[in-house]
Amino acid sequence: MENRDNLRRIIIATVISFVFFFAYDYFVLQPSVANQVENNKTIKTTAKAPQNENKSAPVNRDNNFKVGEIAKIEAQNYEITIDSLGRISRYVLKETKFNTEKGKHLELIPQKLPKPLEIRFSDETLNKKAFNTAVTIDKNFLKIENKPQSLTITQDLGTLKIKKVVTFYPNGRYDVKIELSKGTEYYISPGYRPNVAIDQLTIHGALIKKADGTLEIIEDGDAEPESINNAIIAAGFDRYYTTLLFSKKPITAVIIPDEEKNPVLFVKTDKNLELTGYIGPKYVDTLKSIDPELVDVVQYGVGTFFARNLFFVLDWLYKISGNWGIAIILLVVLVRLVLFPLTYKGMVSMYKLKELAPKMKEIQQKYKKDPQKLQMHMMKLYKEHGANPLGGCLPLLLQIPIFYGIYKLLLYSIELKGAQFLWIKDLSEMDPYFILPVLMGITMYIHQKLTPTNFQDPMQEKIFKFLPVIFTVMMASFPAGLVLYWTTNNILSILQQWIINKIMESKKALMKAKK
């Protein structure tokens, strides 16, 4: 009897821990507000030249110099503005699914320095001149359709001439070639990280990937001055978006903390340089098409291993079905098929344990003063009837990392933003009508009624019966895709439990008939 009590305690403790973990993750770490660019507060930042020792030398601007817009690049899904210092000053996503709550196109470049393609110099005098000298360009408008197009940007600083050839692609990628008339140490930035989807639930900051595959993630508020050699990726990111620089040849990435200790990224060199950049949503397919190394820019926080691999499976199912909601349902079916042998054995064991309850009670009463014999006879009873007191626990434990991976996947995957399914307009947001959470609670209750139980502790029984209510309330504000996963899982569990119950009842009736 002790083993069976342990089974119930394990299941209840696991489920309660599960509830607490998600409740804490979602409600205590509640998003401060999903900031939109139009609501961001501007932090004034002077142009500073990072030094070799990773200190910043302030450089004052000439107040008479006004930075203006000198070129525009238009593609199907984005619009870019180049300013008179040769930087990307605006990057607008034209797809309506990214629009702000006010219906405006989303802008990814915050009002903070540095801007993408911004160049700074270690030489203070040269750096000051660079921020007070307008660039010249060979074209003031590019229309990006099927083929990439290039823009040449030059800046004459007297003792030094800078030439940037920037090639823009339809998918948000750009290539930049930098040529200097003479060797001098300089820094180029992918820009301050997007400041659109910032909350306490997800990580945002900077990511450095080295040539050996190791990653260094610097979250906002934790940045310290640092140089990282042998880097190939320097990316700033928020929940959904990124701005990055990539090189197949090792580069030196420099991290400079801003006033809030958020990481600001630069690439340092004293030679001509060729880099690949990207600004936009963290679409896995898009990043992979630029280079497979860039897939690591999509991080899911704790649980990245499970979330990333589940995403690849979910993405494959989406490409088959054409709908993310259907893909989530198919994923549940796939997971249930993989876990079917264990789940089946667990359900059968729980049914057998219920049938053995009278005999177990007799043994408990007979040997209540001899724990050793009690345990021996209980194990003998389990063995004779093929019952495993822990059989129902393993499938539940295996489901938890999968479910947590789905949770993280839905939090971070921009692919599911705006994904529709039936009445739900966005699977990454809560169900606006609370239909799915209620269905989830109902199906959870039905599954409980079908599942064989024999609680000896009234408190355990009350907690167990109250779980559907707890989960319904908790899951009401979770992403609809997550609730869809759980509801579908409940429905399949109900079906499987009903079939097993019928099979076991038929076997029981057959055995009675033979007697």
Image: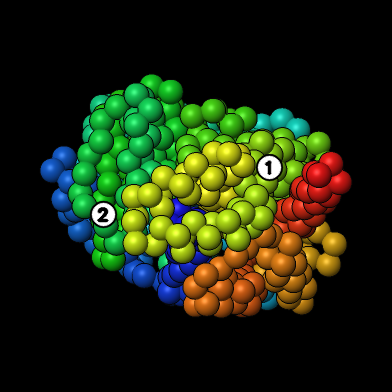
- Name the residue tied to disc 2: 223
Q: Is residue 402 left or right of residue 249?
A: right
- Tag 2: Cα neighbours inside 10 Å, few (<14), some, or many (≥20)? many
x then y, percent, for residue 197: 52, 63
State the image coordinates of residue 405 (x, y, percent, origin top left): 54, 49
Image coordinates for residue 251, horizontal then vertical, percent: 32, 29
- Identify the mark at residue 344; answer none if there is no mark: 1
Q: Nearer the viewer, residue 118 or 182?
A: 118
Position of 208 relative to 241 (above/below):
above
Label for residue 66? none
| Any part of residue 369 in sight | yes
Up the image or down, 488 lies above or below 345; here it is below
Q: Secondary structure at mark 2?
A: loop
Q: How many marks?
A: 2
Whether residue 293 sits left or right of residue 125 in the image: it is right
Residue type at mark 2 is Ala
Residue farthest to the top, as pictured: 249
